[in-house]
Amino acid sequence: MKVIPMIDVGVSNEPLREELMEACAQVLRSGRFILGEPVEAFEAEAAQYLETPHALGVSSGTDALLLALMALGIGPGDEVLCPSFTFFATAGAIARVGARPVFVDSCPHDYNMDPQAARPLISSRTKAIIPVHLFGQPANLCALMDLAQEQGLWVIEDCAQAMGARFDGRRAGSIGHLGTFSFYPTKTLSGFGEGGLLTTKDPEVFKKAHTLRNHGSARRYHHELIGGNFRMDALQGALLRVKLKHLEAYNAQRQAQALRYQNVLSTLPGIHTLQSSPQENSPPAPIPPDTHILLPSVFSQRESVWSLYTLRVLKGLRESLRQHLHAAGIASDIYYPKGLHAQPCYAPYAPPRQLPVVDTLCQEVLSLPLYPGLSEAAQSHILETLQAYRLQPA
Ligand SMILES: *Cc1c(COP(=O)(O)O)cnc(C)c1O
């Protein structure tokens, strides 16, 4: 049986083979493999796409976060607020600069950092907030930017899953003081190995990040700062330039697939959306008692790029639904099974309190296949399989 995977990067790369090979050949001919003209051109094009003045190509999304914190001079004695329900790197970068990650509970609507849960965690040591735009949907930047301004905090948007998403018409990564992106092959701008990007409006921060990227050296063998090697490969820059031109089309495909999931699934019994258009900061609507599955909800002023399509499967049915999908040749996956506040390595930082929304999400979330090139027939098969499960719950 042919399995429908969570993602297939081959289907979007294959039609670009000639162009990608030519981009490689040019770098090969140039004999320059680190930074250089292809990376500079990619940075300019990415900045334009992201509607932000400055973009810096770096070695990974993780390094973009690390570099952002270093450029802000955040270190020992400082605290940084971040979600618990995110990929490891968001908090890892904070701990690696010697600061303390302070884990914030999630909003049950969008799974992102809950601004109301963030406020009471701010102390005199807090220097920054890192909201993550999880699964492609921007976090509540309106409330978080207000909070940051009021408290004098930096905002670093972790846009690793949200390149091209919009909040109130503005691109994710252009609203906070800094933005960080990843080109890991499963991300929406899917790269060819490791790669990342840092964006900022602030020319001083940009200059410092630029120097830190190359061992704190703006002039050869003259080191003003202790930086690192956060440089992007020329091949990566050259290949990403080819893919960036298609990012809008990829995101549009993701949005169309998500819409189809929403439209079809919302007609099935026991499947609901928490609220069709929840108001910012409103308490979560009660979940109807017959609910088996909650569909993801998107706030009205946000545009998600759907890096993942993630359901909540209630009543302990997640594992049986996974098996039902698996038996029909459909992959599914759990992002994330455990909050960072509960990871052993963060025990020294963990709050002596529960993050109830995160703990619930970890028990319930299930992501379905969604990627550019997922065929209509494949999605029909997924939808029919879900419908059949509903008729015969295990
Ligand atoms: C993928 C990801 C990262 C890290 O990016 P890499 O390029 O893999 O280092 C950081 N934050 C989030 C939310 C991610 O999804």
Image (tube, helix red, strand yellow):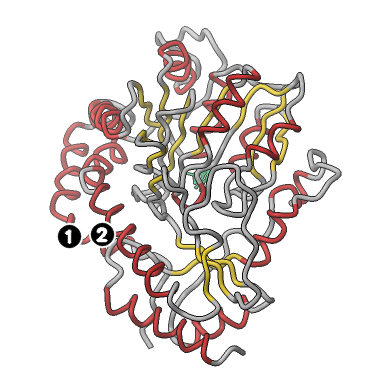
Residue 87 relative to residue 25: left or right:
right
**Circle 1 is placed at which residue position?**
15
Residue 192 relative to residue 326: left or right:
left
Of residues 259 and 237, the one drawn nearer to the viewer in this rendering = 259
Question: What residue is at 62 percent from the left and 19 percent from the top?
Answer: 150
**Residue 147 place in picture, x, y as percent:** 61, 26
The quadrant of the image that shows the N terminus is bottom left
Local SS, label 2: helix
The quadrant of the image that shows the C terminus is bottom right
**Residue 85 place in picture, x, y as percent:** 63, 50
Q: Residue 335 occupies which quadrant of the picture? A: bottom right
> CB under 8 Å between callouts 2 and 1?
yes
Residue 222 relative to residue 98: left or right:
left
Question: What residue is at 46 percent from the left and 23 percent from the top?
Answer: 213
**Circle 2 is placed at which residue position?**
12
Q: Count residues near mark 2 (Cα–Cα under 10 Å), then give few for <14, some for 14-19, many for 20+.
A: some
